[in-house]
Image: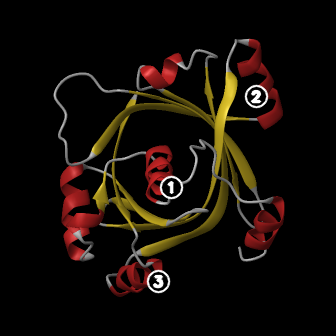
Amino acid sequence: MAFEIELKFVHVDLSVVREKLSALGGLCKGRHLERNVVFDSPQREMKEEGKLLRLRTKQWKDSHETVLTLKLPPKGDIPEDVKIYDERETLVESFDGTYAILEGLGYDGAFRYDKMREEWMLDNVVICLDELSFDTVIELEGERDDILSLAEKLVLPKESASTATYHELHKAYRERLGLAPQDSFYFSEEECQSLLKTL
């Protein structure tokens, strides 16, 4: 069992943050394409209980991996200025095989989402520069005090801080534009191939 502590910053210029990270001595760990499927029961019980069951593929230039993750709401008092999950995850050999197992257990692919992620490390914090189909997002993951300290060092605007999930951010985006509700947000196959060429 491990706790994931994170804070997102939305509508931030990735190039500006990248320059600041480089100037501060941050370590860039490269970019990869992530494709995710979130599973739930037909009655969407996991969503109602604040749980997340996700199957993710990560594609680098010359390698890939598949990860199965379960996120549970933490017990006890938790701070409101960061997002905390009780996170459990493991590498799995086969995306298709794991997908079939989850379906066999009665889960279905409730929605899917993609993002291009560039990872950095600085001051014991993992910094993710995420490009999604609808926005750009900075995600800081580490200990709470380290996250808040680094956010100040990077001059990330407090008004853009968010503890929302990517699904919630996408929902709010569609509502702002008066678009019909849609859970999934992903790149087309052509967009994915184009993004992979940039790795």
Image vertical order of residue 28 relative to residue 183, above or below: below
Residue 87, image x and y in percent? 43, 32
**Alpha-carbon neighbours of circle 1 within 10 Å: few (<14), some, or many (≥20)?**
few
The reply to whether residue 111 is visible in this rendering is yes
Q: Residue at x 44, y 21 (%)?
A: 48
Mark 3, residue position: 15
Secondary element under disc 2, as helix, strand or loop, is helix
Image vertical order of residue 130 relative to residue 171, above or below: below
Mark 1, residue position: 178
Residue 65, image x and y in percent? 71, 47
- 179 or 107, nearer to the observer: 179
Viewer-side label of 3, 1: 1
Viewport quadrant of the N terminus: top left
- Look at the numbered discs 3 and 2 and tell me whether their residues touch, using CB distance below 8 Å: no
The reply to whether residue 94 is visible in this rendering is no
Image vertical order of residue 151 relative to residue 111, above or below: below
Image coloring type: secondary structure
First-in-chain label (3 vs 2)? 3
Q: Amino acid at mark 3?
A: Ser
Secondary element under disc 3, as helix, strand or loop, is helix
Q: Residue at x 56, y 43 (%)?
A: 181
Viewed as shown, does residue 73 lie left or right of 81? right
Mark 2, residue position: 99
Q: Amino acid at mark 1?
A: Gly
Q: Label 3 vs label 2: CA separation?
A: 36 Å
Q: Amino acid at mark 2?
A: Tyr
Q: Label 2 vs label 1: CA separation?
A: 33 Å
**Alpha-carbon neighbours of circle 2 within 10 Å: few (<14), some, or many (≥20)?**
some
Q: Which mark is residue 159?
A: none
- Look at the numbered discs 2 and 1 and tell me whether their residues touch, using CB distance below 8 Å: no
